[in-house]
Image (cartoon, rainbow, N blue to C red):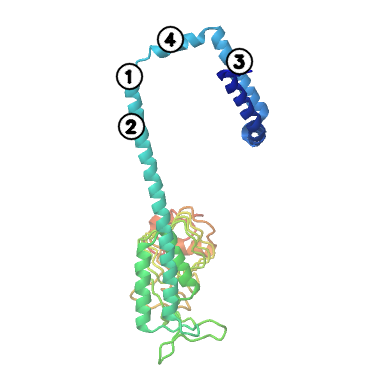
Amino acid sequence: MYLDHNELVYISLGVIFAIILPILVPPFLSAIANSPLGKHWDITLSSILAGVSLFMAAHVTELDLAFARWFDSLKWEALGAVGQILIAILAVWVAWRQNQISESLTGQQNVITQQQTIDSYFQGISDLVLDPQGQLEDWPLERAIAQARTAALLGGCDADGRAKIIRFLSSANLLTPLKRDGLLGRPILDGTGGYVVDLANGVRVVNLGMMLANRDICNTDLRNADLSGANLIKANFVNCDLTGANLVGAILAKANLRGTDLSRIKLFYGKLETASPRDRQNLPNFETGEYTGAVVEDADFSKAIDLSEETRQYLCAWCGKKSRKTIPGGCEDVSNRLGR
């Protein structure tokens, strides 16, 4: 008995399927079972049944024929023009997003670069002013180099970078006037692990001078920072945390201190009754407080928080007529000792 061509093909296909189906079906079913469709089989089955139902309803109501006629009547040339316009709009949007991402990456890279620069500055200053035993040993040339580095870096950093530098210098007592010996000019140890402070004749390792004048330092943490004697004219301290900061003798004229935390700040030495702002023509008296205080004329203290009573009275007395209106708590009970 002979088999014709078609029968031979069918028998061959049957044999092939009998061999491969037991091999392929189990992993295929396992893959479906582990897929989102298999894990949520109820949703999958419901979606399939809903699709079949919609297709049957469209066929019974002849909506499929109406859709086919509408589809055939479309003016594809007009739709092509609209598509080109949409593609152009999409291209513009993609370019805008790429520009945004590029700016974001550039900003992140700038932050990383700035932090690396600041870290190098910290190490460089430490190597410059410390001896091998870790004691402060700053010669005049070394102080000049340290000051030049600080000025250059403060001028190129953002507000956060400036705050980090100030906190570092303050914590290391590099902004504090230190007493020096009469021969070598080295700082004198105080016997308790620190150095003797000399307010009248001491020398700072880094003198901020005008490095922060008219600079932006807003929204930063400057707690316990030593800014004594610094020229901070027109500086922006908005929303800064100046808790415990030393501002004795600092020039805060026309500075913006809106919303700053001024708790425990130090503005002068001596007694409130005799304290007065620094003066070029008069030497400071650190016992009575005369000419030791911060210059606060025309500074803005609106919404400043945690002012002590002593701080409020000093500010009211010496900030001038314009700034008295910005002092939290008012200045009605304090006379204007500045006279203008």
* 256, 186: nearer the viewer: 186
Q: Which mark is residue 88?
A: 2
Assess whether mark 3 and mark 2 are in contact (beta carbons under 8 angstroms): no
Q: Residue at x 49, y 75 (%)?
A: 172
Say which element carries label 4.
helix
Disc 4 or 1, which lies upstream in sequence?
4
x then y, percent, for residue 285: 43, 78
Q: Is residue 311 above or below residue 83?
A: below
**Mark 4 is on which residue type?**
Arg
Mark in the foreground, 4 or 2: 4
Which secondary structure, mark 2?
helix
The disc label shown at residue 53, or none: 3
Residue 124 lies in quadrant:
bottom left
Q: How would you rate the neighbour count of disc 2 (Cα within 10 Å): few for under 14, some for 14-19, many for 20 or more?
A: few
Give the CA distance from mark 4 to mark 3: 22 Å
Q: What residue is at 38 percent from the left and 38 percent from the top?
A: 94
Determine the CA span between mark 4 and mark 1: 18 Å
